Amino acid sequence: MKKIVILISGRGSNMQAIVQASQSQQWPAQIAAVISNKPDAAGLAYAASQGIPTVVVESKAFPNRESFDAALQQAIDSFQADLVVLAGFMRILTPQFVQYYENRIMNIHPSLLPSFVGLHTHQQALDAGVKFHGATVHFVTAELDHGPIIDQACVRIEHGDTEDTLAQKLLVKEHQIYPRAVRLFVEGKLVVEGNRVIVNGSEADSCAI
C-alpha cells in the first residue's frame, strides 16, 4: 500500500478532493499525513476530522530555506512517504529537496504549462488574450513550475471572464485531474521518460472542450 503525504499552506481544497477520492474509490493507498508550514492553515482541521495525522513545520521558525527543507524532509520521511503531493503549498523548495523526491513529488499549477508560470496566472491568461486556460499536474523539478506533465485540464475563456470566474471554473477541473493523477501514481501507471510522462491505461483527454 502506497503512503501519501500532502503539503498545504491554506484551506487545502485539492487536498480534500484527494482525500475524498481515495476514500470513495478505495485506492490501495493511505493518506499518511497532512503537513503545513502554517499553524493556522484551515486544511489541518479537515485532515484531523478524517483521522489523518497532521504536522506543522512552521517556515517562520527557520533562518533559511535549506534548514526549513531539511526539517520538512525529516517530517515527511517519518511517514515513509512514497509520494509527496503539493496542494497549495506556498513555498519554493530547494533543488536538493526536489532532487531527493525526484519523480515522487507532484504539484498542480493553474495554467496550461509551460505558459503562464508564477503567480496571477488567470490575469496573465486574460492579458494575453488566449481563448483557453487550464491547469496542469506535473512532477516537480528544481525549475519553478516546470517538470514532466502528468495531466492537464482546459476551460474556455468567455467574454466577461475575470480572475475570479476563471479561478472558480478551474478549481472544479483541478479537483478532477489532481486526484486522478495521484491515483495513476498509486496504481503504478505513470512512467517518466525524459521530460514526458507515459500513462498506461489513461482516461479520456481532460482538455476536450
Image: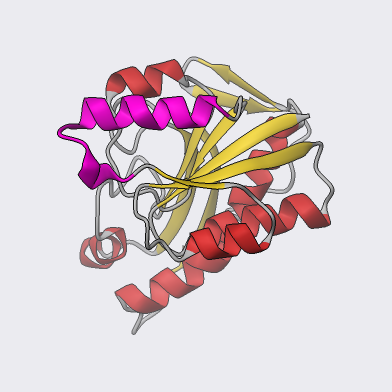
| Nearer to me, 42 or 158 | 42
Q: Residue shown at 32%/17% (left/top)?
A: 96
Asked if the stretch drawn in magenta spans residue 31, the answer is no
Q: For the view shown, which residue lies furthest in the right direction?
A: 26
Residue 124: image location, x then y, percent: 24, 60
Q: Which residues are magenta?
A: 58-78
| Nearer to me, 111 or 100 | 100
- Can residue 157 be spotted in the picture? no
Q: Where's the C terminus, which quadrant?
A: bottom right
Q: Residue shown at 29%/61% (left/top)?
A: 125
Asked if the stretch drawn in magenta spans residue 75, the answer is yes
Q: Is residue 187 above or below residue 17?
A: above
Left or right of 83: which side holds 7?
left
Q: Is residue 197 above or below residue 158?
A: above
| Overall secondary structure of the magenta section | helix
Residue 127: image location, x then y, percent: 21, 65
Residue 67: image location, x then y, percent: 25, 27
| Nearer to me, 127 or 44 | 44
Q: For the view shown, which residue lies furthest in the left direction?
A: 63
Q: Indicate how the structure is coloured in the image.
A: secondary structure
Q: Where's the N terminus, which quadrant?
A: top right
Left or right of 42: which side holds 57?
left
Write down the quadrant of residue 198 in the picture: top right
Q: Residue shown at 41%/61% (left/top)?
A: 41
